[in-house]
Amino acid sequence: MKTVGAALALLLLTANLAGAQLRVVKADLATDVETAARAGGRVRALLRVSVPEGYHLQSNAPRDPSLIPTTLTFSPLPGIRATEVVFPKATDFKLQGQSEPLAVFERQFVIGVHFTVAKDAAPGDLDVPARFRYQACNDVLCFAPVTAEVRWTLHIGGGASRAGQASPEYKEIAWGSGVVPPIEEAPPAFTAGPPAAAPSARITLDDFEIVASTGGYLPTTDFLAFVKNAEQGVKEQGLFEGRGPLAILLLVFLGGLALNLTPCVLPMIPINLAIIGAGSKAGSRSRGFVLGAVYGAAMAVVYGVLGVVVILTAGTFGTINASPWFNVAIALVFAVLALAMFDVFTIDFSRFSSSIGAGGGSRGSLALAFGMGAIAALLAGACVAPVVIQVVLFSSDLYAQGTVVALGLPFLLGIGMAIPWPIAGAGLTALPRPGAWMVRVKQAFGVVILATAGYYGYLGYTLFADRWVDAGEVTSSVEAMLQDGWHASLDEGLAVAQREGKPVLVDLWATWCKNCLTMDKTTLADPTVKSALDGYVKVKFQAEQPDEPPAREVMERFKAIGLPTYVILRPVAARGE
């Protein structure tokens, strides 16, 4: 079967699935107030919620207590009080593998709110803030919970009423059947130093130094090595640390050149040359050189632009590599290409390049070469991400120190990766005489590609499996560790460590983090690890909402990019002891 459409469809599927997973699943929220408010009276309001197609939210009263309910909470506010919140009726959602349907809120719904205005409320506009917390899920997995800030603006006084102009949605809300919302006390603000007021004896992170940090699942031997290195002052040096500028430039360039030897790139060289019409399809060495150069330039541009975006936004390039959808899509693409290598079907590259190419014939198109180079760079990201991340992190540190030229290092990495392509495009214009040996070479490439597909398929499965976790089980595990001597409060743990002159181990966790549970049940439960941590003050810091305070500030302070994260601190006074 000759099909270019299948290959293109798979490439588009790769982009779509990766984009779907990387996109933050957030609800669109809008507030509305029915009428003007009067002192001593009541006023009705609502919150409109809309989630993306294919997603739902857990209801305010899920049947499974391990699921995260949808909540709407208010902080104390003089002159106004929320006296009733009316959630809509939940819908039953049958999830495969679950005996009982889930109680969920579907794509679009409204929540009613009753506000009571104090008799002595001053006339004018009053903003009423609230926090809307929810967890979005689809029919496969649930995502990290989100807490969004919402606010209503109430006009208090003798202003004109909006009666008659209110949305008909108010009539659909079962007023009087709601609940009194809980009053949410504002969380204590995280402080990196002493309070701004008069100095006090409060202990803060400024009283400690970060000795070492790590993250993710660690087997017992690796965790013990992490602790031992921290105690002995052994710090793992990055690839670029302690090197001069010329050596750094050379390392980055050679690193980009070496990326072509990875299993996601090397077997694809003859295939990609055929797609863009280079090599033997080019008609001449100069034409092949140009097509190869354009293809390589696209790779350099992709890595350069992504690197700059990551540096300027303080993000992490590894996010896409951590997407299960992206890894599964890569596995599908490589599986199709492997089957083509075994002649299960034929992908007609020549017809593809000639139909799009400028001037017809077998010559490729420059636009096609550039586009396929960009796609290949993204696909190769599964193999080259560790090197790219190393370069991006180093560039980020330099840029943060005021070295603007550091933004060019990702481009240099891409240039190193691009160098072989014009040479290959010009040098493969005259191929050896076909024979049985070429079939064997093609089948050998097929084995490598098929093995790569299997690896990334398995990686995608494990990434999916890591997201299937019972929040209640994680909570129970943490509670057991708290009873075993761990501290739930970072402030409390720091105070104890300062008083007793002990080092601190901080474990950042969340109820949706499966590796947090795995570490609790395996590595941290190991007797040798427990013995190694006997002299430590151990803290379980819940970073349930990593993008909100106080977790955000703590994670930024520790430079944590995921959970679990483990940080070893030492009191400043204990330096050198």
Image (cartoon, grey):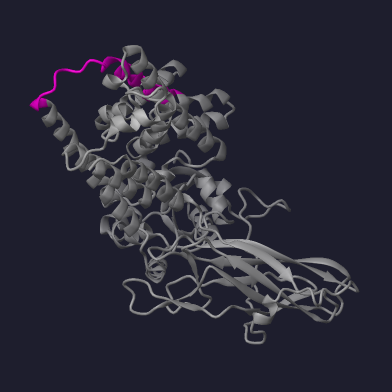
Viewport quadrant of the C terminus? top left
**SS majority, magenta:** helix
Is residue 502 in sight in this rendering?
no
Q: What is the tally of numbered marks visible in this picture?
A: 0
Q: Is residue 70 left or right of residue 451?
A: right
Given residues 346 and 471, the one toward you in this image is: 346
Viewport quadrant of the N terminus? top left
* Residue at 37%, 72% in the rendered image: 95
Q: Residue furthest left?
A: 436
Q: x and y percent of residue 384 in the render?
A: 35, 35
Q: Check the image and report above or below for 235 versus 490.
A: above
Hey, which quadrant is residue 370 in on the image? top left
Given residues 565 and 423, the one toward you in this image is: 423
* Residue at 91%, 74% in the rendered image: 158
Q: Is residue 312 left or right of residue 525?
A: right
Q: x and y percent of residue 243 in the render?
A: 42, 21
The segment highlighted magenta reads 412-437
Q: x and y percent of residue 146 in the render?
A: 54, 61
Q: Residue furthest front?
A: 360
Q: x and y percent of residue 332 in the render?
A: 29, 47
Q: Residue furthest right?
A: 158
Given residues 535 and 85, the one toward you in this image is: 85
Can residue 436 be found in the magenta stretch? yes
Is residue 9 in sight in this rendering?
yes
Q: Check the image and report above or below for 220 versus 394.
A: below
Q: Residue furthest bottom?
A: 176
* Residue at 29%, 55% in the rendered image: 461
